[in-house]
Image: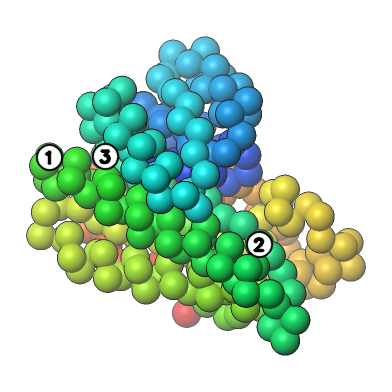
Amino acid sequence: MSLSGRVALITGASQGIGKACALKLAERGATIALSARNQEKLNELAAKINSTGAKAAAFPVDVADEGQIKNTCRAVIAEFGKIDILVNNAGITRDQLVLRMRRVDWDAVLNTNLTSAYLLIQQVLSSMLRQRWGRIINITSVFGQIGQTGQANYASSKAGLIGLTMAIAREVASRNITCNAVAPGFIETAMTAVLPENLKQEALKLIPLGRVGAPEDVANAVAFLACEEASYITGHVLNVNGGMLMG
């Protein structure tokens, strides 16, 4: 499942799932455009990938800013000539019960998690359409499928990504471009590390496989959807949740 010759743009690439995706796609031979807000972490990851003989470069961006998204996509294409694979992974949480949730926290989560994906897809499609090949992979969440108390904004943004995935899949299928989503369950990342231990133990009881997922579990799914062997899969949500949600 080689990705040699492909260029992948990954958002939220400085840590967690995004970092794991970058390392996995680079391992498969892709050139990686690393995107996130933290330039220092991006530079460190780019150096690590380049030291393996693969190729990567850092493109700092705040995906909540439309202008930065446009500039970043132009910069990636100027540097590497094209974008074959887009992994929309950037995401934040601003948890609160809906009765107390501030509008600013609703807007921040929707803009970062959902609107940025729409804007990035818009920017990369021209490159994909010209070459009649592309892979768009949106990182959603099990909580976009089942909801979660205190996360009306996060769950809505992730559910929106699923709808966006299916709409885009229909729009671009005739040009040999696929659009899929990966829905992680409970994954050990910086976002989940801050949760209270009792909450983690309760979550563990809901996972039939009996363990918390690793970022690499998600990265393996992303790598599969990015490859040629997945060319007949589009508009699909691939669950990576240890069995938390089935069907």
Q: Give the class, few, some or many, for how many residues have Cα within 10 Å of label 1's Cα (few <14, many ≥20).
A: some
Q: Residue at x 87, y 62 (%)?
A: 196
Question: Is residue 31 positioned above or below 209 on the image?
Answer: above
Are discs 1 and 3 less than 8 Å apart at CB? yes
Q: CA distance from mark 1 to mark 3?
A: 9 Å
Q: Using the image as rendered, state which of residue 129 and residue 75 is in the foreground.
A: 75
Instruction: Write down the residue under mark 2.
Output: 93
Q: Residue at x 36, y 27 (%)?
A: 31
User: Residue 29: which numbered mark, if any?
Assistant: none
Residue type highlighted by circle 2: Thr
Front of the two marks 2 and 1:
2
Mark 2 or mark 1, earlier in chain = 2
Q: Using the image as rendered, state which of residue 68 and residue 155 is in the foreground.
A: 68
Residue type highlighted by circle 1: Gln
Mark 1 or mark 3, earlier in chain = 3
Residue 89 is situated, as x and y percent measured from the top left of the image, at: 49, 51
Q: Using the image as rendered, state which of residue 136 and residue 154 is in the foreground.
A: 154
Instruction: Write down the residue under mark 3.
Output: 84
Question: Is residue 142 positioned above or below 56 on the image?
Answer: below
Q: Give the class, few, some or many, for how many residues have Cα within 10 Å of label 3's Cα (few <14, many ≥20).
A: many
Q: Residue at x 40, y 50 (%)?
A: 66
User: Residue 131: which numbered mark, if any?
Assistant: 1
